[in-house]
């Protein structure tokens, strides 16, 4: 019978598409005395038994679901690894009960990197690894506005834009927070929490966190 931890690794690889050895160490082996050694032993066995696959072109190695169709040198790999990193950052602050990678909607609408909930409030997260022109960003935000109008959500999620570049975003329809890391966003929430009302103000927008 497969160990619960092994099955969790398989499930997370299916969700995230790809994870590094260090990601797996952080999520499943960090409580052990020799986390890297233990992780290497387990992952080697899981590869041997055809439960997962590995690419040795990266350091540390990266792992995939068994029979993954992703190319082992895909330019999307760093993007998916950033998504895993966002997940790990969130877990330092909250119990992450919902975390969807690249949720799909109607063609032509926004294509978020992540849909999650933070203390009961829904969020889309966009990861900007490259600098976009203002025109490209405007079109991206227009697609989010179209998604809002599509009535896919009764309460449309806030949007967190992970970026080192500040963009001019003006909309009466959507709310966008621009931050370099999830750490900064979560720390801003913690600083502005009001225990008596259990509400928080971030960027001038109030949302309930309890």
Image: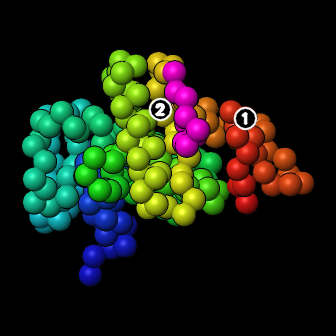
Secondary structure beneath label 2: strand
Residue 48, compared with residue 133, is above or below; it is below
- In the displayed structure, 84 sits above or below 73; it is below
Based on the picture, tell me whether residue 206 belongs to the magenta stretch.
no
- Which of 195/81 is in front? 195
Q: From the image, tell me which residue sits under label 1.
A: 204
In the drawing, does residue 149 fall left or right of residue 41?
right
Which residue is located at x 37 percent, y 73 percent? Answer: 4
Magenta part of the protein: which range? 168-176
Position in image of residue 182 (x %, y %): 54, 37
Q: Is residue 151 visible?
A: yes
Q: For residue 172: magenta?
A: yes
| Residue 84 percent across, percent down from the top left | 38, 45
The answer to whether one can see residue 23 in this image is no
User: Which tag is nearer the camera, tag 1 or tag 2?
Assistant: 1
Q: Residue at x 52, y 27 (%)?
A: 169
Residue visible at 30% across and 42% down? 80
Residue 200 pos. (x, y %): 76, 45
Q: Which mark is residue 162?
A: 2
Q: Position of residue 194 (x, y in %)?
A: 84, 47
Which quadrant of the structure image shows residue 120? Answer: bottom right
In the figure, residue 41 lies in which quadrant?
Answer: bottom left
Residue density around tag 1, few if under 14, some if 14–19, many if 20 or more, within 10 Å: few
Q: Using the image as rendered, state which of residue 60 and residue 197 is in the foreground.
A: 197
Image quarter for residue 186?
A: top right
Quarter of the image for the C terminus: give it: bottom right
Q: What residue lies at 51% left-to-right and 21% top-to-bottom? A: 168
Main SS, magenta residues: loop
């Amino acid at each position: 019978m497969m160990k619960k931890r092994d099955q969790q690794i398989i499930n997370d690889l299916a969700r995230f598409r790809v994870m590094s050895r260090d990601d797996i160490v952080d999520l499943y082996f960090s409580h052990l005395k020799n986390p890297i050694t233990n992780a290497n032993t387990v992952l080697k066995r899981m590869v041997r038994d055809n439960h997962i696959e590995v690419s040795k072109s990266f350091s540390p190695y990266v792992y995939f679901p068994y029979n993954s169709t992703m190319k082992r040198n895909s330019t999307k790999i760093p993007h998916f690894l950033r998504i895993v990193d966002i997940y790990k950052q969130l877990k330092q602050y909250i119990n992450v009960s919902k975390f969807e990678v690249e949720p799909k909607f109607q063609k032509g609408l926004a294509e978020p990197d992540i849909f999650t909930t933070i203390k009961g409030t829904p969020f889309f997260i966009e990861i900007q690894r490259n600098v976009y022109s203002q025109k490209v960003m405007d079109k991206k935000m227009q697609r989010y506005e179209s998604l809002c109008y599509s009535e896919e959500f009764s309460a449309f999620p806030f949007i967190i834009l992970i970026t080192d570049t500040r963009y001019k975003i003006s909309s009466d329809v959507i709310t966008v927070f621009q931050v370099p890391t999830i750490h900064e966003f979560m720390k801003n929430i913690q600083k502005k929490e009001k225990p008596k009302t259990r509400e928080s103000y971030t960027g001038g927008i109030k949302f309930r966190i309890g």
